[in-house]
Image (spheres, rainbow, N blue to C red):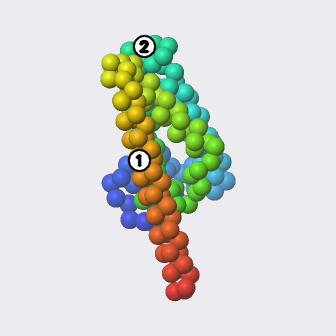
Amino acid sequence: MSTSITAGPFIKAMRFVGDLDDEFYHDERQRDVWNEASAIGFQLFAWTSLISAAVLPWVAGTTGAWIGLGILVVSTLINFATAGYSAARGVNLYTASKLVRVRAIVVGVLFAVGYVSVLMTLQPGVYSQASSWAGGLVGAIVGGGAVGAVIWYMRKRNARFENEEIDGS
């Protein structure tokens, strides 16, 4: 399975991680089934990681908070690498799929609970005042609004480009 896009260092590294040049991928059905199985495995790992990261600070204290933070950071980086690979291959997750759905909201809540749990466990004095919670809430609303605005802009821009391609064809 060869890439039609010039493979830079990131693409080459991700292809190595995924072992995408193995002869196993030459059979289309095997590749499709394995890609589905890999997606299921990735999602299962993501869900269990997020749930663990959200629960660990409460059940294992400071040690659990540090482990939870590590899980959250690694999970976040893996999600960015996955979306980055997809975007580098010409598929933008944020414009190609519906992001506001129950599943995405649950994942967002788990990330938020995990990060807040870690912060509350590692820095309990900071989050004991109402002003800290109010600042965090305002920051979350503004940050979420900014992310929503960027996604909306990207979708609108990509729709415009697609319309220009259709009209120009």
Spatial CA distance of label 1 from label 2 is 30 Å
Is 72 displayed left or right of 104 in the figure?
left
> Mark 1 is on which residue type?
Val
Look at 33% across and 54% down and name the residue there: 9
Q: Residue at point 53% right, 35% down?
A: 109
**Label 2 crowd (10 A; few <14 / some 14-19 / many >=20):** some
Depth order, front residue of 14/95: 95
x and y percentages locating residue 62 in the rendered image: 38, 15
Q: Is residue 34 above or below residue 8?
A: above
Identify the residue position indicated by label 1 in the image: 142
Of the pair 102 and 49, the residue shown nearer to us: 102
Residue 49 makes an appearance in the image: no
Farthest residue to the bottom: give it: 168
The amino acid type, in three-letter code, at marker 2 is Gly
Residue 8, percent across and down?
34, 58
- Looking at the rendered structure, the number of numbered marks drawn on it comes to 2
Residue for point 58% across, 57% down = 97
Q: Find residue 64 and report its horizontal and vertical position in percent.
A: 43, 17
Other residues around mark 1 within 10 Å, as few (<14) / some (14–19) / many (≥20): few
Give the answer, above or below, for where 14 lies relative to 72. Answer: below
Residue at figure coordinates x 43%, y 58% from the top left: 150
Picture coordinates of residue 134, whole percent (x, y): 40, 34
Q: Residue under label 2, please give it.
A: 61
Question: Is disc 1 placed on a helix, strand or loop?
Answer: helix
Nearer the observer: mark 1 or 2; the answer is 1
**Which of the 4 quarters of the picture holds residue 125?**
top left
